[in-house]
Image (spheres, rainbow, N blue to C red):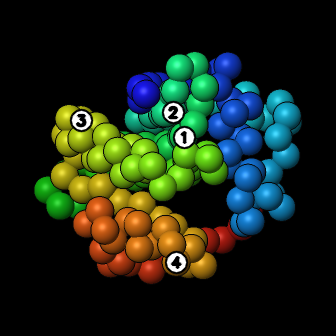
Amino acid sequence: MEIRRAQAADVAEIVAMIANDQLAAKRESPGDPRYLAAFAEIDADPNQLLAVLDDNGEVVGTLQLTFTPGLSRLGMKRATIEAVRVRDDQRGSGLGRRFIEWAIAEARARGCGLVQLTTDASRADAHRFYERLGFKASHVGMKLPL
């Protein structure tokens, strides 16, 4: 099992994992060409890292790391973890923990002083998972659809 930067050839498998979810199933459209355009934009941005868990050429997990420079906290850079997915048949194997620990180490290596993430309020299992890894619910997130 290796963790690596995603490639365009991985996009269909990544989108399938994202769509295989009670919340995302209604909003995603696997096969839509806009995903490849979005991937190209992510891949070209040095402050974005779309990573995959690769099991002998098969993508079994994904997450996106965003590195954000800022002025607060004495100009501290922070990392945001988003779109974390581990394929259904791999859950409970410890891969999710390993993947998040890798993301934290990557953030540290890039000079970040904080790692943050959001998770839907309805995902109680995910909240427990992140809390076991040391994350604390410290803020209230809000969205405004455009």
- Residue 97, percent across and down? 36, 51
* Residue at figure coordinates x 85%, y 34% from the top left: 31
Residue carrying label 3: 110
- Residue 126, percent across and down? 49, 68
- Residue 34, percent across and down? 79, 35
Above or below, comparing residue 133 to residue 51 in the picture: below
Q: Earlier in the sequence, mark 2 or mark 3?
A: 2
Amino acid found under the numbered disc labelled 4: Ala
Q: Earlier in the sequence, mark 3 or mark 1?
A: 1
Nearest the viewer among 12 and 87 is 87
- How would you rate the neighbour count of disc 4 (Cα within 10 Å): few for under 14, some for 14-19, many for 20 or more? few
Mark drawn on residue 52: 2
The Cα atoms of the two marked residues, 4 and 1, are separated by 20 Å
Q: Earlier in the sequence, mark 4 or mark 1?
A: 1
Amino acid found under the numbered disc labelled 1: Gly
Question: Mark 2 or mark 3: which is in front?
Answer: 2
Amino acid found under the numbered disc labelled 2: Val
Mark drawn on residue 61: 1
- How would you rate the neighbour count of disc 1 (Cα within 10 Å): few for under 14, some for 14-19, many for 20 or more? many
Q: Earlier in the sequence, mark 4 or mark 3?
A: 3
Q: Earlier in the sequence, mark 2 or mark 1?
A: 2
Mark drawn on residue 124: 4
Q: Secondary structure at mark 2?
A: strand
- How would you rate the neighbour count of disc 2 (Cα within 10 Å): few for under 14, some for 14-19, many for 20 or more? many
Q: Secondary structure at mark 4?
A: helix
* Residue at figure coordinates x 38%, y 65% from the top left: 130
Q: Quadrant of the N terminus?
A: top left
* Residue at figure coordinates x 48%, y 55% from the top left: 92
Label 3 near label 2: C-beta < 8 Å? no
Label 3 near label 4: C-beta < 8 Å? no
Q: Is residue 84 left or right of residue 69?
A: right
